[in-house]
Every structure is written in C-alpha cells, then in structure tokens.
Amino acid sequence: MSFALLLLAIVPGLALLVFFYFRDRYKKEPLGTIFLAFLLGAFVTLPASAGSAFFQRLTGWLTPGASIFRTLLGTFLIIGLIEEGWKFFVVRFYCYHRPEFDEPYDGIMYATAVALGFATLENIIYIFSPGVLGPVRIGILRAFMAVPSHAFYGVLMGFFLGEAKFARSVAEANLLGLFGFILAVIAHGLYDFIVIFLPHRPLLTGSLIVFAVLVWVVFFEATRRQAEKSAHRAPELIGLGRSQKTENQEPKE
C-alpha cells in the first residue's frame, strides 16, 4: 500500500514533466539538466513550507474563520509569494544561466520542471500525513488539481523568463522576468483562495472548473507559441541571446 501511495504521489508530476518535454518539438533539453531542476524544485519545498507556516502563525491570516480580506492576504502574500519566490529563485539564478537555456521554450521547460519537483514532494508530504480525507482521496484530488496548478504557475513564470532571455536589453529582461513572477504569484494565490473557501462557498466550484480549463488552454497555447520560436526555426535568436549575455557580462563604469 505504501508503494502504491508513493506512486500516486510521484506519477502525476512525472507525467506532466513528460508532457512538457515532448511539447518542445525542435530541441529537447538534456534529461540530466531537467531532472536536476526537478530535484531543486523538490528541495526548496522544505524552506518554502517552513516559511509559509511561520508567517501564517505570525499573522493569523489563514486561521479558521478568518475574513475574506485576511484570507486573500494570506493566500497571495504568504502562500503565493513565498512558494513562487523559492521557485523563481531556482529558475532565475540556476536554470536561466545554464548554457542549455538557449531558446524561449526553455523558460517553460525549466520553470515547470522546478514547479513539478515542488509539487511532487508536496504531494508526498500530504499523502503520507494523517488527514481527514484519507491518502488515496487526497492523492487523486491533488493529481487532477494541485499538481497541474503548480505546472500552470511554472508556465506563466517560464513563458516570460523565456522572453526575457532574448529581450533587447537587460532592463527589459528584468521587467519581463518580474512580470512572469507576479503572474505566478497571482495565479497561485487565486487558486488557494478558491480552494480554502470552497467548503464554505459551494458556488465557487464553478470557478475551480473554469480555472482547471484555463490551465490546460494555457498549457497548449503557451507551449505551442514558445516552441515555434525555437532557434532552430529562427537562427537569429541565437545571436540575440549571445549579445544580451555579452551585455550582462560587460563591466559597469
């Protein structure tokens, strides 16, 4: 039973990772680099969870019976900001500077690898922790909602980091990266707000369904668009990326 539960925790994240891997039609990333990004995403689950728990206790924003406003603050400024902040740290300061990150789609590939590593370890923690719903039900619910949602935040973040990599200037690259990060935080906070209020507001079930449909629409559309920008289809992107890298490395006066 424990092995079956472990598979239930791990398989959804790996299945989505395979999906994003094969959506890159022109130049697939090295499996070792992707797997390392996945592992780093899993690793930062621990400090992110600890930080989130600390600030939840400190503020009381997500305590049972908290007002809608306090819950909004908690889901956006604690859960969303802290969890996406750790993921962004890994993608921006490790994956982004890898030599393998050489086309726009790579932003999505590495950001979702980090996000799915995060979601997978989070799955293991939830499934093997005592809960009211039971481990199997929790695992199934998270497989269809929480894991794809984490990938969704990764797609939002990674799409704009992929654009940032080939931006015309460092300033533009920084703005694009920041925009992707903010979008990921907003999407994460909104999802958690819906989930927390779902038991008390049954009509929000419709919002969750809309969110789930939006996730898959974005998965297919964002990956299609970035895959079509592959440097193998547009070789001039390679030179643009190199020129930005050179600009980043130039000493400041």
Image (cartoon, rainbow, N blue to C red):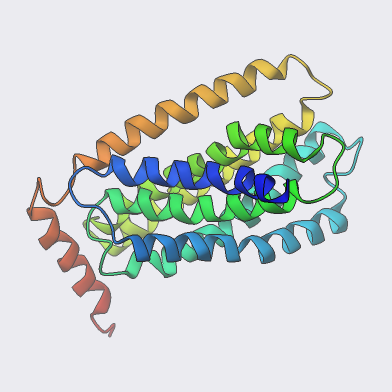
Left or right of residue 12: residue 91:
left
Q: Residue at x 72, y 50 (%)?
A: 2
User: The C terminus is located in which quarter?
Assistant: bottom left
x, y percentage for residue 216?
A: 45, 28
x, y percentage for residue 68?
A: 80, 32
Q: Residue at x 23, y 70 (%)?
A: 245
| Front-lying residue, 110 or 245 | 110
x, y percentage for residue 145?
A: 61, 33
| Front-lying residue, 162 or 132 | 132
| Image quarter of residue 101 | bottom left
Q: Residue at x 64, y 34 (%)?
A: 191
Extreme residue toward the right, this view: 65
Left or right of residue 250: residue 159:
right
x, y percentage for residue 162?
A: 31, 52
User: The N terminus is located in which quarter?
Assistant: top right
Left or right of residue 190: residue 111:
left
Left or right of residue 102: residue 181:
right
- Image label count: 0
* 207 up-or-down from 168: above or below: above
Q: Residue at x 41, y 31 (%)?
A: 218
* 140 up-or-down from 3: above or below: above
| Image quarter of residue 140 | top right
